[in-house]
Image: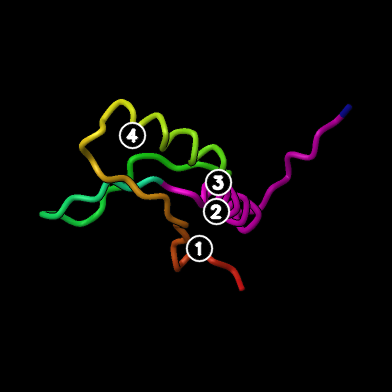
Amino acid sequence: MPQNTDYDSTTENQAKAYRNRLNAWAITRISPDTKPVIVARFRTRSDADGYLRHLRQVIPNTTFEIIVDYQRDEVVV
């Protein structure tokens, strides 16, 4: 079966922006001395929750938060 391989650059850019928006959930490490650092990104909230539980067991003395990480230039209205 032949595949459509004729892509223009706008299609590729739209696909890349869409893939970047898929991983909207992020876990950040909160430190009082520095700004928050993103540790991992996830497609679903439940995946982020599961990994957050794991991080809190492995590194109990560190503060982590789940955030929605939409980057302003990639959001399409």
Q: Earlier in the sequence, mark 4 or mark 1?
A: 4
Q: Residue placed at 73% from the left, 45% from the top?
A: 6
Q: What segment is highlighted magenta in the picture?
A: 2-26
Of residue 63 and residue 22, the one placed in the foreground of this image is 63
Q: Which mark is residue 56?
A: 4
Q: Which marked residue is nearer to the observer: mark 2 or mark 4?
A: 4
Q: Amino acid at mark 2?
A: Arg
Q: Residue placed at 85% from the left, 30% from the top?
A: 2
Pointer 4 with pointer 1, Cβ within 8 A: no
Check residue 14 for magenta coloring: yes
Q: Residue placed at 57% from the left, 41% from the top?
A: 46
Pointer 2 with pointer 1, Cβ within 8 A: yes
Q: Earlier in the sequence, mark 3 or mark 2?
A: 2
Q: Earlier in the sequence, mark 2 or mark 1?
A: 2
Q: Earlier in the sequence, mark 2 or mark 4?
A: 2
Of residue 66 and residue 7, the one placed in the foreground of this image is 66
User: Local crowd at mark 2 within 10 Å, few (<14), some, or many (≥20)?
Assistant: some
User: Local crowd at mark 4 within 10 Å, few (<14), some, or many (≥20)?
Assistant: few
Q: Which residue is mark 1?
A: 74
Would residue 13 appear left or right of 69 to someone viewing this image? right
